[in-house]
Amino acid sequence: MAYRLIWSVVAFCFIPGLIKAEEQKDSTYLLKEVLVTAQHTNRDIIPVQTLSGDALHKLNSNSVADALRYFSGVQVKDYGGVGGIKTVNIRSMGTNHTGVVYDGVELGNAQNGQIDLGQFSLDNIEALSLYNGQKSEILQPAKDFGSAGTIYMKTRKPIFNEGETYHARATIRTGSFDLLNPSALVELKLSERISASLSAEWVNSSGKYKFRYRRVNPAGELAYDTTAVRQNGDINATRIELNTHGSLSAGTWTFKAYNYNSERGVPGAIVNNVWRRGERIWDTNSFVQGRYTGYFGRFTTLNNIKYAFYRTHYVNNDDKQVKIDNLYKQREIYISSANEYEISDCWRISGSYDFLWNSLDADIYGFVKPDRISQFLSAATALSFDRFKAQASVLGTFIHDNIKGQQAPSDKHVLSPAIFMNVYPMRNKDFSIRTFYKQSFRMPTFNDLYYADMGNSQLSPERVTQYNLGILYDHSSATSFISNSRLSCDVYYNKVKDKIVAYPKGQQFRWTMLNLGLVDIRGIDVTGLITINPAKELYMTLRAQYTFQRAIDITNPADNYYKDQIPYIPRHSGSAVANAQWRGWSLNYSWIYVGERYNQQENIRYNYTQPWYTSDISLSKDFRFGNVNLRGLIEVNNLLSQDYDVILNYPMPKRNYRFTLTVEL
């Protein structure tokens, strides 16, 4: 019965677009292209944090994961070095509840559910946004309604002025850890309707850096204090990306081809006087995706298609551990259709259907070779009045697993509702009050369920319920001393049932999985931004954020860790960024703080992990010679040379440097 319902709604989602397209076939009009560039003035119903343009590229960040550290409510797990794995957790709900969308299509990893954001460079990223709940649009793929929080990465789209047919940019970056990082971007205007861009990058680094490791025993006595050089953190990676954009008489289309290849050492934990490991990973991540948006009067259709192939080769030659040489292959097929109809100027409805197929193969004896069919069906509506906006949605998730030679878990059919509201009590709309309620659901990954050394077939799926209440003040004035000011505060409560937690099991690539049962998360996110113009051509911007989180395990009162903070979640964290610009010069200072945490479930002194903070500073200068733009950039990261760990026994680099030269035509 459920599948009949699915295919009935599929017909509703796909057929209207085909009918509308057929109706419009004989009505084609060629219009002269008009380019409009302006600041987006729509206020989001749903809390959003965005970094874009110069604000994004002035941060002392080399990857998307580095930039996300400046968002409130975000914890970045960083295992150190240029090539170290970097994953993101939003509001303590876990990495697997965080969707990562790249140019409109969500990235996937059915094997472990974790997207290594250290693999994505900022060189080709135009904007980076983080939504709690879901995006403030009802025209989106059904799968996008399912994440508890979502990161959106948007690549640069070519914009050509009159008479321009191409743009070119070359960047060379070098610095500490024997870093060599050249990249290039070429943008071409192929016709009045079609443009293309090709981006390529190479990263090579030894990953070696000095660190000091100091530990005290539970009695407070010094256990050891040593200085050494971090080993096995090298990386050799290439990225190449092709984007094509086109416009039609009643719509737009894009095509993307992406390939990432890397060989990396896996920097292991510093324990028992072991300073290097024999673990290495070879990654080949490739995908192609297409996107079509059609506009037919009050009806809009958005369609995506994607094929992805991920190959991971993992080797462990450590003499003190079991020798491992495994090859994993993932395949993914994704088809999506979202359709929106505007009933009136203030009321819109939408329906979306997504089909997702994932498979995993490995050269391991007895591996069950799972594959999964996931279907997502959503219905949503949005109301927009002068001082009130609301959005509601419901997502149906239907999952079926197949495994070789064993009984697969039972099919999952889950409904996840959500409702969002935003009120503007003042006439000028500078001040708003927002709130939302949302349920979300995520299946355990293939590794969670089926991997022989770490899987747990008895794992229960995670279910999250989110509540949020916030206020926002946002004011802009191009003529006043304070050109822009923004202050927001959100109070939230999340309840996670059967939370799945992964702990490193002596090796970074291998984990042990368990359900914590019930986790209670309460927190406050505060963000602020102010831009002033104290003198002619001088602009100064200060951006700051603070997060308080109480994320406790409330599964069983008999447990020793009952009501203890869950591992690696700080009670207090925050960041600040100060930027000054004058006549092509730009000075940027950034500061990040992460409070005390515990590295195990019990909040005892033995498991205590010290707070840490870092200061980064950069100075850049823009030059122009005819049609050539130059930018020179000097960065000093961890300015005060702090010794700190993000994850216990994975020491981070001390003071380090980076130098960048960019040439743009």
Image (cartoon, helix red, strand yellow):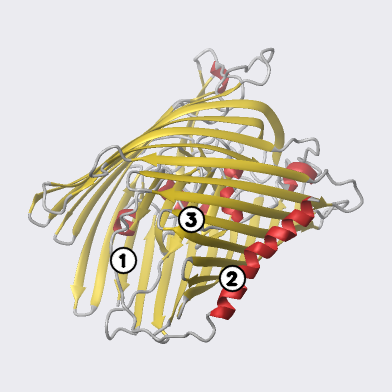
User: Gap in Å between the C-alphas at discs 1 and 3?
Assistant: 48 Å
Seen from the viewer's position, the closer of residues 377 and 298 is 298
Q: Amino acid at mark 3?
A: Arg
Disc number lying in front (2 or 1): 2
Q: Earlier in the sequence, mark 3 or mark 2?
A: 2
- Look at mark 2 in the image and give the residue it sits on: 17
Q: Amino acid at mark 2?
A: Gly
Residue 661 marker: 1
Seen from the viewer's position, the closer of residues 24 and 270 is 24
For label 1, the SS is strand
Residue 348 marker: 3
The image shows residue 568, relative to residue 308, as above or below, that is: above
For label 2, the SS is helix
Q: Percent from the top left, x then y, of residue 274?
A: 61, 38
Q: Residue at x 51, y 72 (%)?
A: 294
Q: Is residue 245 left or right of residue 56?
A: right
Q: Residue at x 25, y 70 (%)?
A: 630
Q: Residues within 10 Å of mark 2 (few under 14, many from 20)?
A: many
